[in-house]
């Protein structure tokens, strides 16, 4: 499984928000003669998100020629659509949930008509009407792949971890690790606050008090930590060396350890965690909107599609029944029990500047303490 999940909050938001590489040159999927009888469909998406086998079958079954433009940056998608205005060259883009408000405010996306997606019922209920996916009382995209932060543990030494509290259990002193900035927002949740800052709009004092409480809590328990880390490869190596038994980890690095046969398990404790979700979105004024809906429906038609997307991308599928398509190790690496999945709070675009400023300052204070 490809370890492509982002290692920390800031680089997560950079990857999801804009600031990496430019859009790749369009790569045309060449159809068999006659496939284009029903027109074309132009998609901007990330590498490995839409499996080639799925695209080949869709083209053959629908007669629609699919053209793919690869991207690895949200900002470049936004800039391209903005530049093209009312005459977009793409029909579907791949937007991260926390970027919805920017795309929607600029009128770059059209509201999703789930009535045109007969297989919508095959989307996991946790995503069908999720609060993060609904803006201005409309849904705006089909969730396809998700990543999240979890509690990773070496099951040879830690059999159960129902709460984030275990990260502060004295018996594991010096055997834990985390990304300070990411873990601070989780500690805010653990302490009963809003780690995503959505409820702190125009409440800077309340937000600062909650942030300070999490900061002070981490400083108080600093002796629990073997090492603060930044890159996913660091936490992987600490688990491999058995330097740590417990750690906060993005799902990607943990999944890679599991797929490589290490005794690691990733879970979402009862207090919850944070994640992000990529969605396929129909562009406003898309020249081939009806074909776009046909593809969205085809994505949901079979759990085999979701399983292939998970294997290729390293992210977790949003489609019902995918777990049944995976082997035991793949299930452990890429799926969660439904009750844990529903504990994930997906990043919102609301109040992000306040969040970044306060968390960055508190992170520096923890490290300096």
Image (tube, helix red, strand yellow):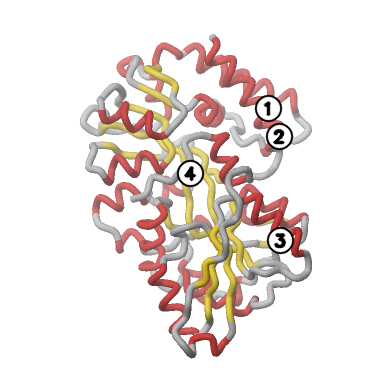
Q: Which residue is mark 1?
A: 357
Q: Which mark is residue 81?
A: 3
Of helix, strand and loop, which one carries label 2? Answer: helix
Taking the spot 58% from the left edge, 59% from the top edge, the residue there is 94
Badge 4 density bin: few <14, some 14–19, many ≥20, Cα 10 Å? some
What's the distance in space between the residues labelled 1 and 2, CA to CA? 6 Å
Q: Disc 3 and disc 4: Cα gap in Å?
A: 34 Å
Tag 3 or tag 1, which sits nearer the N-term? 3
Closer to the chain start, of discs 4 and 1, is 4
Residue situated in front as seen by the camera: 57 or 190: 57
**Front one among 81 and 129:** 81
Q: Are the residues at dot 1 and dot 2 in contact (C-beta closer than 8 Å)?
A: yes
Residue occupied by mark 2:
353
- Mark 2–mark 4 Cα distance, whole angstroms, equals 24 Å
- Residue located beneath label 4 in the image: 343
The residue carrying pointer 2 sits among few (fewer than 14), some (14 to 19) or many (20 or more) residues within 10 Å by Cα, namely: few
Compared with 74, 221 (above or below) is above
Distance between the alpha carbons at the discs numbered 4 and 1: 26 Å
The answer to whether marks 4 and 1 mark residues whose Cβ atoms lie closer than 8 Å is: no
């Amino acid at each position: 499984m490809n370890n492509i999940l982002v290692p920390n909050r800031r680089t997560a938001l950079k990857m999801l928000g804009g600031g990496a590489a430019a859009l790749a040159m369009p790569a045309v999927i060449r159809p068999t003669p006659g496939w284009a009888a029903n027109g074309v469909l132009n998609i901007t998406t990330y590498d490995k998100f839409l499996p080639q086998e799925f695209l080949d079958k869709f083209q053959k079954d629908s007669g629609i020629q699919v053209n793919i433009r690869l991207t690895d940056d949200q900002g470049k998608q936004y800039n391209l659509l903005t530049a093209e205005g009312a005459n977009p060259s793409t029909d579907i883009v791949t937007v991260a949930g926390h970027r919805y408000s920017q795309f929607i405010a600029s009128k770059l996306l059209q509201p999703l008509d789930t009535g045109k997606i007969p297989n919508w019922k095959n989307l996991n209920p946790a995503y069908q009407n999720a609060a993060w996916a609904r803006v201005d009382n409309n849904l705006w995209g089909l969730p396809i792949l998700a990543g999240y932060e979890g509690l990773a543990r070496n099951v040879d030494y830690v059999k159960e971890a129902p709460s984030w509290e275990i990260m502060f259990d004295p018996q594991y002193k010096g055997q834990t690790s985390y990304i300070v900035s990411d873990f601070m927002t989780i500690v805010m949740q653990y302490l009963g606050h809003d780690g995503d800052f959505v409820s702190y709009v125009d409440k800077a004092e309340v937000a600062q008090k909650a942030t300070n409480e999490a900061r002070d809590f981490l400083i108080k328990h600093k002796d629990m930590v073997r090492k603060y880390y930044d890159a996913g490869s660091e936490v992987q190596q600490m688990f491999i060396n058995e330097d740590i038994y417990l750690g906060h980890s993005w799902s990607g690095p943990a999944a890679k350890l599991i797929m490589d046969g290490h005794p690691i398990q990733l879970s979402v404790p009862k207090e919850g965690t944070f994640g992000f979700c990529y969605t396929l979105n129909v562009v406003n004024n898309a020249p081939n909107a009806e074909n776009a809906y046909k593809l969205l429906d085809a994505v949901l038609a079979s759990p085999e599609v979701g399983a292939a997307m998970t294997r290729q991308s390293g992210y977790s599928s949003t489609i019902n029944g995918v777990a049944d398509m995976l082997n035991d190790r793949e299930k452990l690496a890429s799926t969660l029990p439904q009750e844990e999945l529903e504990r994930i709070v997906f990043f919102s675009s609301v109040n992000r500047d306040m969040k970044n400023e306060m968390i960055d300052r508190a992170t520096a204070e923890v490290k300096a303490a």
